[in-house]
Amino acid sequence: MTQEPELTFIPYFHEGLVPLDRTTAILRRYEIHAVINGCQVVLDIETQDDCSSRCLSVKIEAPEGDGAAAPGVTTEVLQKVPVAKLIRLSRESRLITMSPGGEANLSVSLPEDPYGLRHRELVPGKPLSDEHLRAVADQYRAAVKAGRPPTATIRRVAGVGKPTASKWVREARRRKFLEETG
């Protein structure tokens, strides 16, 4: 089993934030620094309005060496740089929570699951908890605000199928955690 690369996270606060709700936002832009196979790798990442990530640039520097003995950035090195994995590993670093006073705080929650839908204890056949349905309603409202399809966002975030996500939304509405649409 390979060890995950250690990431250094450089936020670009001056680029602004992508809001999820009143208290949570995602950094608009940031850099990830990692060492892969001895090479320094820097990814410049931008968060889109739909909260997805887009890599703007990748910079790879070979380790220093003496003249011809320096390994350089070879095709083998390039093939071993896991760009998508680095972006995925960095996602927890880009979530910002806002204090009531308006101060920004870096958080360690996953931005794709800011309401903890993946980590809820759900038992098949048991009623859904109010806590879970409140999280569903919060995620739904954040998706609407960001212009994303809300039920599809809940499906993606929670890792469930369309029938399950739709059931959760219906139940959140029935229990008045979510407003009726329409």
Image: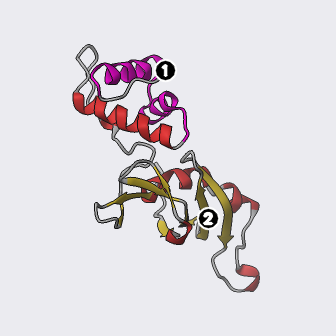
For the residues carrying marks 1 and 2, which lies nearer the camera in this image?
Answer: 1
Within 10 Å of the Cα at label 1, are there few (<14), some (14-19), or many (20+) other Cα atoms? Answer: some
> In the image shown, does 101 or 93 lie closer to the viewer?
101
Q: Residue at 70% of width from left, 60% of height from top?
A: 78
Q: Magenta segment range?
A: 147-176
Q: Which residue is mark 2?
A: 44
Q: Residue at 42% of width from left, 34% of height from top?
A: 140
> In the image shown, does 98 or 45 lie closer to the viewer?
98
Q: Is residue 174 on the magenta stretch?
A: yes
Q: Secondary structure at mark 2?
A: strand
The image quarter containing residue 163 is top left
Q: Which residue is mark 1?
A: 162
Residue 56, x across and y down, in percent: 67, 60
- Taking 15 as reference, is 113 above or below it? above
Amino acid carrying mark 2 in the image: Asp
Q: Residue at 45% of width from left, 24% of height from top?
A: 181
